[in-house]
Amino acid sequence: MEEKTLQKLKELIASNEKIAIAVGKNSGIDEMGAALALYLSLQSSSKDVVIACPTEPLVEVSSLVGIDKVRTALATDGADLVVSFPYKEGEIEKVSYTLEDGYLNIIVKAGNAGLSFSEKEISYKRGGGNFAGLLFVIGTARLSDLGNLFNPEMLKDATVVNIDNKVDNQGFGDLVLGSPRFSSVCEQVANLINSLGLPLDIDSAQNLLSGLSFATDNFQKPTTSFLAFEMAGLLIKKGAVRKASPKYEDTALQDFSFTPPKIRQPADKTKPLPQVQSQIQEEDFGQDRQDQEEPPSDWLAPKVYKGSTLV
């Protein structure tokens, strides 16, 4: 990150007590983990922080620390309260209010036609002028992905910081911290928190490592950046625990199992050893000499040649 950009962010955080963080609809572990980590870090810095998503958090992000703090509106506490209900011409004669026992009663006086809407159709939401001066939009490619969170009137005086790694990011905001060369949003936010010197406790570190591991397929994707490995080391040092990927857990026994060798039982020394029969046949050595016939008596006597008497 450029020193100029880093210094600008430090000044923005220092000058704004109210800070908002927004993520797009149906955000996954990487985006939500990064947003919640930044939320927890800024909150530890004594900032008044809100985090919002236009849709209810997905089941896959339910284990992230601080997920119960995610709202569906960006306005901070103390903002205007808007009461809404269906309106048809001629149904309402006038609207007034009364104060009674510390309660403000809003009275909608029905016209001649009467009120056609029911109590279930009345909605309540925060809105209006108490909005944060600094807004971080995390892992969101388009402002339209913010749904009802995007209100031009509310955002006109806010400084918007866009942090994302998607190729199709539209580059909105006053500060754009995004590039597809990053393999996750969590590694970007981890680097940002570390560079700004913001608090990074074990809960923030675990959220970031969970998102980083998910985005990189447990560091197996060839697109995993060098920053991902650097930040993973930092997060583990802060106390985060790297969890095994489910696919490795499922195949662990299959891939690394072995059959133990059979252990030969010791011989029972009380039993006599079996007799070993020679495989050598007697005929291989010829017949026994005692069985051979005695040689003729004249076998060793000198032999005399007798020629013919015929001349």
Image (tube, grey):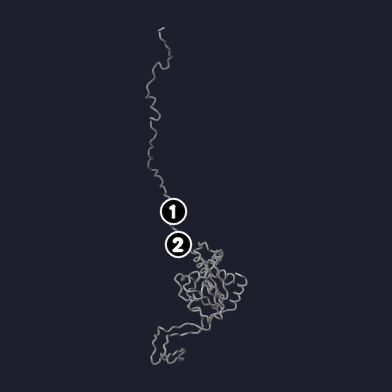
Q: Looking at the image, is 81 positioned above or below residue 249?
A: below
* In front: label 1 or label 2: 2
Give neighbour class at mark 2: few <14, some 14-19, many 20+ (Cα, 10 Å).
few
Task: State which tag comes first along the sequence, 1 or 2.
Answer: 2
Kind of residue at disc 1: Phe
For label 2, the residue is: 247
Q: Residue visible at 47% across and 63% down?
A: 245
**Which of the image's four quarters has the C terminus?**
top left
Observer-nearest of 263 and 4: 4
> In this image, 143 relative to 11: left or right?
left
**Which of the image's four quarters has the N terminus?**
bottom right
Give neighbour class at mark 1: few <14, some 14-19, many 20+ (Cα, 10 Å).
few
| SS state under label 1 | loop
For label 1, the residue is: 258
Looking at this view, name the residue that lies furthest to the top: 311
Q: Position of residue 227 (x, y in %)?
A: 56, 65
Is residue 150 at least partly visible in the picture?
yes
Q: Position of residue 122 (x, y in %)?
A: 42, 84
| SS state under label 2 | helix
Q: Looking at the image, is 19 positioned above or below residue 304?
A: below
Count of marks placed on residues: 2
> In this image, 281 relative to 72: left or right?
left
Q: Position of residue 304 (x, y in %)?
A: 43, 12
Q: Quadrant of residue 134?
A: bottom right
Kind of residue at disc 2: Lys
> In this image, 221 relative to 7: left or right?
left
Q: CA distance from mark 1 to mark 2?
A: 20 Å
Q: Position of residue 8 (x, y in %)?
A: 61, 75
Q: Residue 169, which numbered label?
A: none
Is residue 205 at least partly visible in the picture?
no
Observer-nearest of 281 and 109: 109
